[in-house]
Amino acid sequence: MNFDDTPQEAEFRATARAWISANAPKKYEEELRKSSLGRTALKNADILKVAKAWQKKKADAGWACLHWPREYGGRGSSPIERVIWSQEEGPFGQLSRMFIIGHGMCGPTMMAFAREEHKRSYLPPLASGEKVWCQLFSEPAGGSDVAGLRTRAEKEGDDWVINGQKIWTSGAHYSDYGILLTRTDPTVPKHKGLTMFFLDMKSSGVEVRPIKQASGASDFNEVYFTNVRIPDHQRLGEVGDGWNVSLTTLMNERSAIGAAVSTGFPELFEYCSSLMLDDGPAIEDRAVRSKLANWAVKASGLKYTSMRAISALSKGERPGPENSIGKLVAGSMIQDVATYALDLQSASGVISGEDAELAGRFQAMLLRAPGTRVEGGTDEIMRNIIAERVLGLPGDIRVDKDVPFNKIPTKGRG
Amino acid sequence: MNFDFSDDQKQLRDQARKFLAEKCSPKAVRVVLDGKAPYDKELWKGLAGMGFLGVAIPEEFGGAGAGHLELCVIAEEMGRANAPVPFSSTVYLAAEALLIAGSDAQKKKWLPAIASGEAIGTLALFEGKGNPSPKTIKLTATNGVLNGVKKPVADGAIADFAVVAARTGSSGRESDVSLFLVDLKAGGVEVKSLTNLDPTRGQAEITFKDCKAEPLGAAGEGWSILTQVLDRAAVLCAFEQVGGSDRALEMGRDYALDRIAFGRQIGSFQAVKHMLADMYVSATLARSNSYYGAWALSTNAAELPEAAAAARISATQAFQHCAKNNIQVHGGMGFTWEFDCHMYYRRANAMALGLGSLSYWEDRLIDRMRKKNAA
C-alpha cells in the first residue's frame, strides 16, 4: 500500500502543476477556495466569463476534457491522468461547474451516437467552453421516472417537430445546444417509444424560463417547445432507441456529479475550531466533538473510497461499485452539517446573507441542500441502484412496464 | 499509487477464508457459544499451523516475519468467520505490546510461544467502568509486586500471560502508569470467568494478590506504550469488524433473496432493499477508513492515531449497523438462537466496547485533527 505516483504519473503531475501555476486566474483563487454549496458566485466578476476564459485557455494548451480523443478537442489522457489533473487544478476546478453537464453527459452521448461529421464540428467547441450544452430529460411528469416523459416528436418530411415541456434543465439560459429525449411513439410501452436528438437552443420555438428554486436562486430552468423543428440528421441513435441512448448519458451523470459533490465537513470543522460557545471553545465541547467525529469518519470514508477507485484506475482496472455511495452519503450529510452549524449559532442562525455568521455560508448551504438529495438521482433511486446493481436484489415491480404509454394513468386521484 | 492490498496479500486472504470456511463453520462456533468449550482449541492449533498467529511477528522470534498488512487481511477473515479463539487479545494486544516495549528476553520467551499457539496472552487494562485513562488505573505495583483487580479482561480465563497496566506513581500525570508482564500460571492471581454479551470470546475478572511481575518497558512509560498498542489494535479490530459487517450484510442479502412473503421475494420491497443498501454504505465507508488505518499501521506513519480512531469509529458503527439490521431483515427467525444472526450481533456489540467506547475514540480523533490543523 502506498500513495506514491508512478514515475509517469509524477511526470504528468509536475507538467500539469507547472502549467496551472503559470496560467490559472490566481486572483480568484481564494474566493473559489471558499466557495461552498449554494455559494459559488464571484464578488467582482461574472463567473461565467471567468469560467469560459479559463476553459478556452486550457483547451488552447491541450488541457480541456483530458480523457476525450484529441480529434474531438481532448488530450487522449488515461483516467488516472484526468484524476491527477483535477487534484492539481484544485479550487480552479470550481470554474468547470458550468461545463459539467456538457462535458460529463452531452459529450459522451454525442461521442457514442452522433455522426462523425457532427462529432468533429460540435465536440471541440464544447470541450473549449466556447459552446455550452445542456441536457433536456426531466419533465413535470417524469423525474425519477424519466421514461414517463411526454414531450412529443413527430416526423414531418426530413424534420421532426417537437412540442412539450422540460424542467430542471441546468444552465439552459446560457446554453447553445442541448440533447433532448422525446416520445416518438405513445402507443408502445414507455421505454420503447423514445428517441434522442440534439438541437440548437436558439431554434425558433424554444423558450427558456428560469425556475425560482426553494433556495431563492435560479440554477435551473423550464424549457418549452412549440413546433420546434429538428433535422433528422441530428437524431442520436435509432428511432425508438432513446432509452438506451439516455442510459449512456445518465451513467455519466451519476459518476460526474458524484465526484463533484461536497460534504460540508471541512467548512464545519474550520468553523468549530474558531467558534466560542458560552462555556468555552466549541471544539472542546463534548457534544460538538462527538458530532464532528461522526461526520469526520464519513468524510474520510468517502475520501478513501474514492482513493480506492483512483488506485484501480492507476492500475488500469475498472473501479468497483463502491463509488456509487458518494452522492447518497454526501447529499444528506451536507444537509445535516448545515443544520448543525446553524444550531451552534442559536437564534442568530436565522440571519442569512452578508449580515450572518461567515457571510451566510451555512445558511446558503442549508437552503441549497435539499436539491443535492434530488438532482442526478434521488436518494431513493441511488439506494435502488446499490441494492439492484451492487447487491443483486430484484428490481422494483413495474406495473406500467408492458402497458402502451397512452394507456398509463396520469393522475393519482380522480 | 496503490491504495489496495497486493496480490500476495489478497491470496493470503483467500487462503484464510478457505481455511476458516472449513475449520470454523457456524457449527464449530456454536460449541463455544453454547458453553461446551472455552475456546476452539483445534482451530487455534490450526491457525498456528497456518502461520497466522505469528504472521506479523519477526522470524527471529518464531513468526512468519510478514507484516501488519498481512495481519489485516487475516483479521478480516477472523471477523467474517466469527472465530471463537483468543486472536485479538493474544495477537493484537499482547503480541503488539511485546513488539513495542518488550526486552529481547521477554520477546524470546513469549513471541515464539504465541506464534506456535502454545501461549495465549491478553491485556489487563480496565478496572470496571470508564474509558481508558490513567486515572482509572488503581491496581498498584510496588517493587514489582501487583495488588488490585482488573475487569473485564478479554480471554482472561484462558490466558497464560497478561500485560498489566499498574499505578507506580501519584503525580496525577500519565507517567504514573507502568506496564508489567505477568505469568498467570505462576500464582498470585485469582481468575473468575464472567458471563458476557459474546460467549464466543470470554471475559474474566483477575485479582492480583501480591503477584510478582516483571516490568514491560520503562517505568512511567506505560501510558504512552498503551496508547500505541490501542491504536494498533484499533486498526486490526476494525478489519475484524469489516469482515463481520460484510458477512452480516451477505446473510441479510441472501435471506432477502430466498424468503418469499406477500407472494414475492422480500428483497423486492424497497423498505428491505434500502435497508440493505444503507448497510452496504456503512460497510464500504468502514472498509475505506480501515484501509487508511492499515496503510498508517504498516508504514508506522505519523497519521496512525488519527487513522486508527477513524477506522475504529467507522468500523464499529458499520458492524453494529449491519448486525442489527441483518436480524431485522430475517424477521422473527433472526431472533431465534438457532439462526446465526445473533452471533454477529453479540460480537459487534462486544467489539464496540472492547477497546473503550466510541466517546474515547471520538475524543482521540478530534484531538489529532486539531493538532494537525494547528500545525
Image: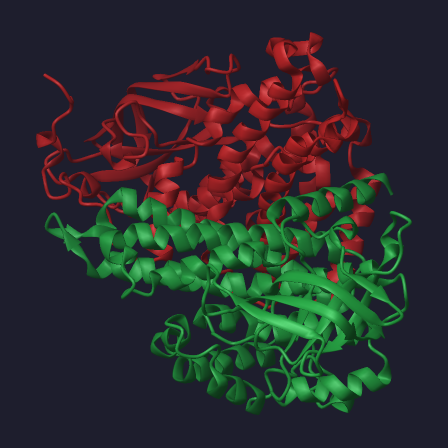
Chain colours: A red, B green
Please name the residue shown 59% across and 10% down the image: A350
Residue B288 horizontal side relative to residue B67, left or right? left
Whole-percent x, y for residue A361 in the image: 66, 20
Q: Quadrant of the C terminus of chain A?
A: top left
Q: Which of the 4 image quarters holds residue A154?
A: top left
Q: Is residue B264 above or below residue A371?
A: below
Residue B198 horizontal side relative to residue B86, left or right? left
Residue B252 horizontal side relative to residue A65, left or right? left
Q: Nearer the viewer, residue B246 or A164?
A: B246
Please name the residue shown 49% across and 68% down the image: B79
Looking at the image, the residue that sits furthest to the front is: B209
Whole-percent x, y for residue B51 in the image: 60, 88
Is residue A129 something that shows in the picture?
A: no
Q: Which of the 4 image quarters holds residue B52?
A: bottom right
Q: Which of the 4 image quarters holds residue B86?
A: bottom right
Please name the residue shown 19% across and 43% down the image: A192
Q: Nearer the viewer, residue B275 or A227?
A: B275
Whole-percent x, y for residue A18 in the image: 83, 48
Q: Nearer the viewer, residue B368 or A331?
A: B368
Whole-percent x, y for residue B143 in the image: 89, 70
Q: Is residue B48 above or below residue A182?
A: below
Q: Nearer the viewer, residue A213 or A295?
A: A295
